Image (cartoon, coloured by chain):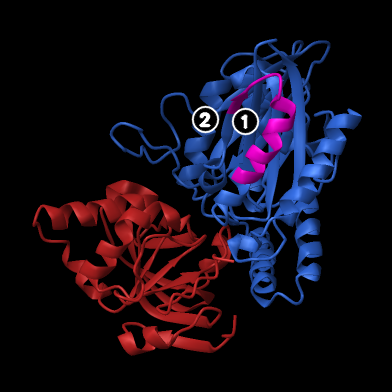
Chain colours: A blue, B red
Amino acid sequence: MDRLNLLKIIENSLYSLISYSAQTVTKRTINEIEKMLENEKKNEIAHSQLELMLENILYGKKNQIPVCQDTGLINIFIQLGENFPIISDFKKTIIKILAQLTNDSKLRANTVDPIKFHNPGDNSGLNTPPIYLELIPNRDDLIITILNKGGGCENISALYMLNPATGFEDFIPLILNEIKNAGGKPCPPIIVGIGIGGDSVKSMYLAKKALLRPIGTRNRREEVSALEKNLLNQINALDIGVMGLGGHSNCIDVHIEWAMRHPASYPVGLVVECYSHRTISGRISKEGGFFMGYLDLNYNFVKNEDGV
Amino acid sequence: MKGNLHKHISLPTSKKIVYELKIGDIVYISGLICTGRDQVHKKIINLIKDGKPLPKNFENLKNSAIYHMGPIVKTNSDGTFQIISGGPTTSARMNPFQTDVCKNLNILFVIGKGGMQGVNWNELPAVYLQFPGGAGAIVSKFIKKVVSVEWKELGPEAAWFLEVKNFGPLIVAIDTNGGNLYEH
């Protein structure tokens, strides 16, 4: 396929993916909220909030409007096959599509100058959107994953640079404390992403990337998987509740990723996601085929017409 | 938590109604409300501090409600506005401004999510009403009209004056008697 046509397909795919993402909470997240609704039958407040949340998710989907007015900073994760024919004009295309989506009321104008507080009104500006690019050897396709990251939950992010000798024991109480203090602010039931090791930036990146894994999947490494389950139980034992209104429907899942660390450092990154978990992936083949789907446990693309 | 009174409130209303509401009560609101986030709260406070007048529109909020929300707005071809999605934002960001804003505008209801600290609800008086965060799409059903907008250059962070009908269910989450559903 020639370059111009392929670029047009990338443009259209980005438009579809980002508008779909803003309108759709993942199926696995909805399933977990439905389970919580069942468990909270006796807690009238929690039950009514969960009911409204589910009703809203259906309403947004049916009417094709953003489920949450905070369509987030559009986090874009790109897996670029090294043999994919186009490696230029990506950023230009992304910026153009974001402006179009904002103009079409599919996204809120969500970029603000941190010095002068000016909002350009089209999701543009310096160093935005956050794009995370990975080059994938021996591949000739392009995988784009969208994560709508709202401000309320993103504000609960944290980075801990711990003492390596005790880092592994120290970070769990720190994270529990952070989440407890956040109360209703990140819109619980939340999803928790954690990155252990690497450097400061890598641990934060892994914490965010961990949110792309399907709900209910565990890390491949046994110790890390056990830690995920343990933390999930401990967070749900806290007294926070749906939207901070009391009860134990606090956390939908905990995902942890890790990286080798420097001998002197023990970084732990925390990124929190709200219950309105909106992520979708798309694969574009070099022939111009476009498929929607999601990333699996190993962050590999899986085709799925309905999303996950 | 003993409440669960279901009440329809037409704005503007009376302080008496506000004193009567208890945590856990469910209310549905109709009438004129105004959105306000960090920027609107800060602007109001700064104008008052500098002894400058507020835009006239704010006078219409007497005995009404402020809603912590930044909408997705569509501009129609005739120049009118339409709210596409508009759920509450995190109210705690307005903690330092809320008391003064309520006092100066005579606001009786603060609508948001996640609760607030440092506001003397009894003295104002005012109550805090919670709608689930993220539930933005469904709110568009309750918004009948965008009446006007102040400080439009702020985009979603502007003060959008909205006519709402049966907006709810809103839970009374902080009342004038010290009741607070976020403290447990």
- Look at the image and say whether residue A119 sits in the magenta stretch: no
The chain carrying label 2 is A
Total number of numbered labels?
2
Task: Provide the residue designation for mark 2.
Answer: A129
SS majority, magenta: helix
Residue under label 1, please give it.
A76
Taking the view exactly as shown, the residue that stands out farthest to the front is A165
Can you see residue B14?
no
Q: Are marks 2 and 1 in contact (CB under 8 Å)?
A: yes
Secondary-structure class at tag 2: loop
Q: Earlier in the sequence, mark 2 or mark 1?
A: 1
Q: Nearer the viewer, residue A106 or A54?
A: A54
Same chain? Circles 2 and 1? yes
- Asked whether, in this view, residue B172 is left or right of residue A29, the answer is left
Q: Report in which chain the residue with disc 1 lies.
A: A
Instruction: Name which residue type carries label 1.
Output: Ile
Q: Residues within 10 Å of mark 1 (few under 14, many from 20)?
A: many
Residue type at mark 2 is Pro
Compared with A126, A74 (above or below) is below
Q: Nearer the viewer, residue A209 or A195?
A: A195
Q: Residue at x 36, y 37 (%)?
A: A120
Q: Which residues are magenta?
A: A160-177
A175 is within the stretch colored magenta: yes
